[in-house]
Every structure is written in structure tokens, then in C-alpha cells.
Image (spheres, rainbow, N blue to C red):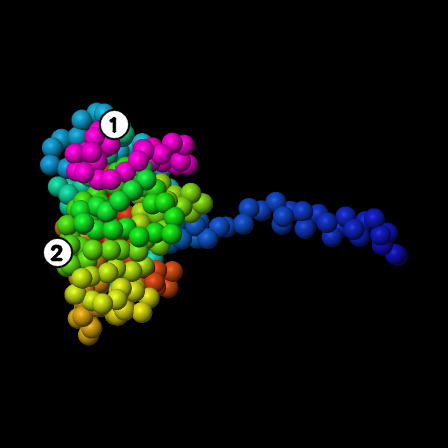
Amino acid sequence: MKTRPAILLAALLVPALAIGSIKPVTMFEKIISVHGTYLESTEPMQCGTSPIGPEAAARITSWFERVAVWPNFRHMYPMGTWEIDAAACSVPRTPAQCLADLDAAGVPYEPVDHVKNLIAPVKITGPVGGVLLVASKDVIIECELASHLPAMAAVLKAREITQIGILSSHRPQAECSFHAMGLALDVNWMKATHWQRAMWLKSDFEKTPELLTCEAKHETGMSRTLVGAACDLWKKRVFNTVITPNYNEGHANHFHFDVRPGDNRFFVR
């Protein structure tokens, strides 16, 4: 008996339609299934040296609600170092408080309106603490990150670093990234007064994949300066996250620094 074409077509289409209705597992879902999410709860952590008031707690929860379900990328790669330091945790401020703190610290900035995902966006307009941020386009970041720049400058100046190259800052299209929130900087070179040329992360940073980043010995002076600066920024809790080219190939040519308001965990790799 011959099969009618219409019946054969239906027999082929039904399974195909059923398969098409199955939602594919995304890369982020795969990561979460193995490594978990960024946060297990949006409840505030112990943060700062004083008890957290209800208004500050609400601001922390608001930040956490934006990132809690992100994949926990930091657990994907070996040899990273996590430390909890509640005293160094940064309690998020109101926009007015944060901008007032920038004024008090002498950070050169201009407020910026209507920047996607940012609460109090600012554009950095000059050197901070004697350190020039060199970029091909405007450095627009969240005020909470800008408030950490004077401490960053103090650490870098201690190693005679007076210029840094900003590879990227706010990237609204970055998915599950603190760049999208204006809370991260990528730095691909640094210039110190005792070197005639810039130190490039891609070529001058010596990777030590089998050793903890801040315990490894480096052969060249430039590499020692670069890793020393990165580890100082982590040890002094200037940033919650300090990633070097040791982390993965996606960071082979730059440092990644980010601030995570209300988070008392500090990571370096």
C-alpha cells in the first residue's frame, strides 16, 4: 500500500515541530548547573564596620537582585583566591551621597544622563590622584566605581605608575557582566616613570597558570610591576575582583577590575 504524500509530510513535520518547541539549554544555564549562581540569596551580607540600616540594606538588596541569578564565572577556573572581608565591604550610597563623595575626593567628573543600566553615571574628565586614564572614548562608569579611583591611584602611584590604558568601561551589551552596570574597568597597559615604554599586559605580563597569582615569582621587572600592582589592589581591597591574564584566554591582554556594592567577597586570579 502506498503512503499518501500528505500523510508522509505530516509524519515528518510533527516530530520536527516537537523538537523545535524544546527550549535549548544556553551556555549560561550550563555554567549554572555546574558552578551555581553568583548569589544564593539577595539578602544583605555583613558589610562595613557598622550595622547596616534599613535604607542601606534596601540598596544592597536592590543591587543583588540585578545580579543574583548570573552564572558564577569565578568558580569555573582554578587557582583563584577568594577572601571574605566584611570590614572592607562597600555599602552602596544614594546617588547624591556618592556624587558628594566624588567632590570631596577631588575626582574630576561630569554627571551623564540616561545611560543604560546605570544609577548615577559619571564621565571621568581628567587624571585621578595623579594617574591619567587613557582611553579611545569617554570613560563612563557608575559613581560607585568612580569613588574607588582615588584609592586605585594611590596604589598605582606607590609603584610609580602614572598612566593606565582603559580598554573598556561601560559596555551596555555585555551580558551577565559588571561592565553592563558601569562597575568594571579593563586595563590593557600601564606606564611607570621608571620604564621608557608602556607595560602591555599581552606581552609583558608573565603568566603563571600553575601558581597562585600573588605568590608567583616573575622574571622581568615589568611583569613584577604589573602583578605587584594588581595584587596590591586586591590586598588593599580597592576592588572586589582583580583578574589578570592568568584567569583565561578572554583576559589574556588585560586586567579586569570591578566593584560589587554590598558584596564582602574579594577575588583575585
Asked whether residue 45 appears in the rendered view, the answer is no
Around disc 2, counting alpha carbons within 10 Å, would you say few (fewer than 14), some (14 to 19), or many (20 or more)? few
**Labels 1 and 2: the sequence-earlier one:** 1
> Seen in the image, is 137 located left or right of residue 1?
left
Q: CA distance from mark 1 to mark 2?
A: 31 Å
Q: Nearer the viewer, residue 15 or 1?
A: 15
Range of residues picked out in magenta: 97-121
Q: Amino acid at mark 2?
A: Ala
Image: 138 above or below 246: above
Label 1 close to label 2 by CB (< 8 Å): no
The residue located at (27%, 64%) in the rendering is 198
Picture disc at residue 96: 1
The residue located at (38%, 60%) in the rendering is 250
Which residue appears farthest toward the bottom when viewing the image?
A: 219
Q: Amino acid at mark 1?
A: Ala
Residue 225 in the image: state x and y as whole percent: 18, 64
The residue located at (32%, 33%) in the rendering is 111
Picture disc at residue 158: 2
Residue 134 in the image: state x and y as whole percent: 31, 52
**Dot 2: element:** helix
Dividing the picture into quadrants, the one containing residue 47 is top left
Quarter the N terminus occupies: bottom right
Picture disc at residue 104: none
Quarter the C terminus occupies: bottom left
Asked whether residue 224 appears in the rendered view, the answer is yes
Q: Nearer the viewer, residue 124 or 244?
A: 124
Dividing the picture into quadrants, the one containing residue 191 is bottom left
The residue located at (24%, 40%) in the rendering is 108
